[in-house]
Amino acid sequence: MFNWALTFLIIALIAGVLGFSGIAGTATHIAWIAFVVGIIMAIIFFITGKRTPSP
């Protein structure tokens, strides 16, 4: 989730620099939602003790 949040944040920054304010705003909202969902999932996994398998 944090990777997606970072990806959309970078897209938003590039779009903002190029003047595409609509795309930048949308990408920022998507990045915020992905970040919040990632934090919530991290807290749930921390409380329940589940870990993601490492590759």
Image: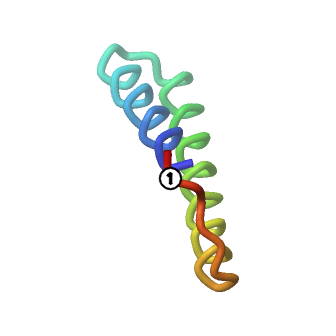
* Residue at 49% across, 33% down: 8
User: Looking at this view, is 19 or 46 the one in front?
Assistant: 46
16 relative position to 53: left or right: left
Q: Quadrant of residue 11?
A: top left
* Residue at 65% across, 73% down: 50
23 relative position to 15: left or right: right
Please name the amino acid that badge 1 sits on.
Answer: Ser
- Residue designated by label 1: 54
* Residue at 59% across, 32% down: 26
User: Looking at this view, is 9 or 24 the one in front?
Assistant: 9
Check the image and tell me how it is coloured: rainbow
Residue 47 % position (x, y): 64, 85
15 relative position to 37: left or right: left
| Crowd rating for badge 1 (residues with CA inside 10 Å; few <14, some 14–19, many 20+) | few
* Residue at 43% across, 30% down: 12
Residue 9 % position (x, y): 42, 37
Name, please, the residue furthest toward the bottom.
47
Q: How many numbered marks appear?
A: 1
Residue 43 % position (x, y): 60, 76
User: Looking at this view, is 17 or 11 the one in front?
Assistant: 11
Q: Quadrant of residue 29?
A: top right
42 relative position to 13: left or right: right
Relative to 17, residue 43 above or below: below
User: Looking at this view, is 25 or 43 the one in front?
Assistant: 43
Q: Secondary structure at mark 1?
A: loop
Relative to 36, residue 14 above or below: above
